[in-house]
Image (cartoon, coloured by chain):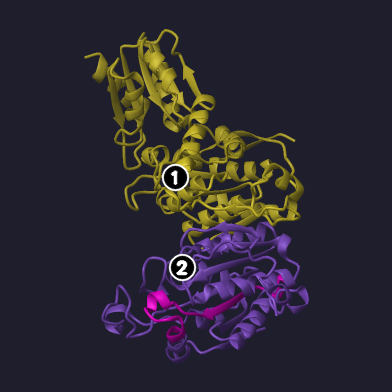
Chain colours: A yellow, B purple
Amino acid sequence: MEEIRLMKGNEAIAHAAIRFGMDGYFGYPITPQSEVLETLEEQMPWDTTGMVVLQAESEVAAINMVYGGAAAGKAVMTSSSSPGISLKMEGISYLAGAELPALIVNAMRGGPGLGTIQPSQADYFQATKGGGHGDYRLIVLSPATVQEMTDFVGLGMELAFKYRNPVMMLADGIVGQMMEKVVLPDFRPRRTEEEVREQCPWAACGKHGRKQRNVITSLEMEPEKMEANNIRFQEKYKAIEENEVRYSEFMTDDAEYLIVAFGSVARICQKAIEEMREQGVKVGLFRPITLWPFPTKQIAELGKKVKGILTVELNAGQMIEDVRLAVDGGVPVRHFGRMGGIVPNPGEIEEALKAHFMK
Amino acid sequence: MTIQEIIKPENKVHSRPRLLTDNITHYCPGCGHGVVHKLVAEVIDELGLEDRTIGVAPVGCAVFAYNYIDIDWVEAAHGRAPAVATAISRLEPENVVFTYQGDGDLAAIGTAETIHAANRGENIVIIFINNAIYGMTGGQMAPTTLLGQQTATTPYGRRADLNGYPIKISDMLAQLDGTCYVTRQAVFTAAAARKCKGAIKKAFQNALAKKGTSVVEVVSNCPSGWKLTPEKANEWLKEHMTAKYPLGDLKDL
């Protein structure tokens, strides 16, 4: 049954995973996302749903455990924060190469290097442009609220299985740590072994009477076959781009200026827009929910109607590149960002917009 | 006697194990991998585990292990097989999961995954082929390369002051509370291969009995990497490899 609770985004992810019927979670402690593993250990889902929860010896081991579980057709996930996600990149590339479904949560913190434990959005490039080696794509979901962190566990897993592709929930330290009211979804039973075998006929979970053996691998020594694999991946990515773009808009109908922001920062931008609207400045907000596939067409359309676009990000300007590609030089696009764990207030965003476009 | 008479079923004394596929081998002549593959295929068949065994292949010469034994396989990233096997085993407790790894995979890049899977007592079988060299990449130094042994990256012989010492990782694994069985075997003679098969069978039976992690190290050869004929390679193995890596059980609970 649905349940309304007050909790942190990280805690909500744990509860959502159990309620979704997740088969396994494999993680390693790192601030600011350790509450995911802590909450799961506290809830002991192995006694109720049978979900496996394991603290691995490293992020590298954790993502490879995810790879193993996914290879067996199970619904599995991991979570970490920026430095830990860098360690997972090898495994993420293998997941993409072997076409395995999995959910990876990144509660971003400031970098580079060990950086800071404060919130950031500086892993946008890593999540959307590759990160690991090879020509692959992740479906990247960007939650702005604790509710979305909850909902994107189920959505992410569904997309992962639909396309046999890893999905990343690119959250940040703000939504991970912030407490909000959240509606937790109903409990769903985990799939039975028979259901897994039926839904994932490709899975390496023991032949159980199947004539052909299943082999999960990303290796192909013949270049013609490897190119054919890559072409198949690209076709899949194209289908994802056509079908899975998600976004939200706020006061864009009559907007003369547009702010594009993702995740928690979009909420600060919304506050700035409300204040500017009171002053008569017609600003709207566009929030990409899928960072890949990026809402290119939607931003291109809005770009035709406005005088300028400001991207607001907790980084030095990463998503701005995709916004610029979308509008293709048709309208000026400027960036405002804070780095190193600093979160801007609505006043700073208002000043930046006016400085760039209303001098 | 005509050929037709010779190949009569009643004259058959040996055949390819049922679970060994007839794919053309990519292993070099004289290599021990083929023998170990055969033993693993026989054990899985004899224990009736064809339908519920999942193999985890390594990176290295055995990267194509999945081409030869007719069961479900997962190809792991370099060194990560024990982590991959951990998850499969925990999520599929009714199945038997084994890894098949070489010395570079298990004792260099995958040391952490190996030790921690064994220390958790994961209910898996680890088959560890130790031939003291990186075969697939062209014969570079392995963590188990002997002192003085020439490789592509120790062309004047491995030196302790430059390269450290050969690692006896099975001895380390035997110290961990999570392992139930750690043994060092070989396949360079028929007698050794028979003994090795017994060890592999015991390891799989331990997994069925959920006793924890079993490790079967197979001291093997690499005629191509060692630049020796298969016969000379086996002589070198007997003289040098078994001196550093003595055969026998290290732990059997």
Residue B216 drawn in magenta: yes
Q: Where is residue A312, by image quadrant?
A: top left
Q: Is residue A36 above or below residue A160?
A: below
Q: Which residues are magenta?
A: B205-233
Residue placed most toward the observer, A233 or B79: A233
Confirm whether the magenta stretch covers residue A29: no
Q: Which residue is mark 1?
A: A224
Dot 2, how many residues are within 10 Å of its Cα: few (below 14), some (14-19), or many (20+)? many
Q: Image check: B87 left or right of A128?
A: right
Q: Are marks 1 and 2 in contact (CB under 8 Å)?
A: no
Could you tell me the amino acid type at mark 2?
Asp
The numbered mark at residue B105 is 2
Q: How many numbered marks, from 0 up?
A: 2
Residue B191 occupies which quadrant of the picture?
bottom right
Establish if B109 lies above or below A171: below
Q: Check disc 1: other Cα within 10 Å, few if <14, some if 14-19, many if 20+.
A: few
Q: Is residue A277 above or below residue B78?
A: above
Q: Residue at x 68, y 74 (%)?
A: B3
The C terminus of chain A - image quarter: top left
Res B11 quadrant in image: bottom right
Q: Is residue A57 above or below residue B157?
A: above
Q: In the image, are marks 1 and 2 on the same chain?
A: no
> Which residue: 62% across, 67% down?
B98
Which one is in front, B199 or B24?
Answer: B24
Q: Position of residue B233 (x, y in %)?
A: 43, 83
Frontmost of labels 1 and 2 is 1
Q: Residue at x 43, y 50 (%)?
A: A89
Label 1 lies in what chain?
A
Asked which secondary structure carries label 1, the reply is helix
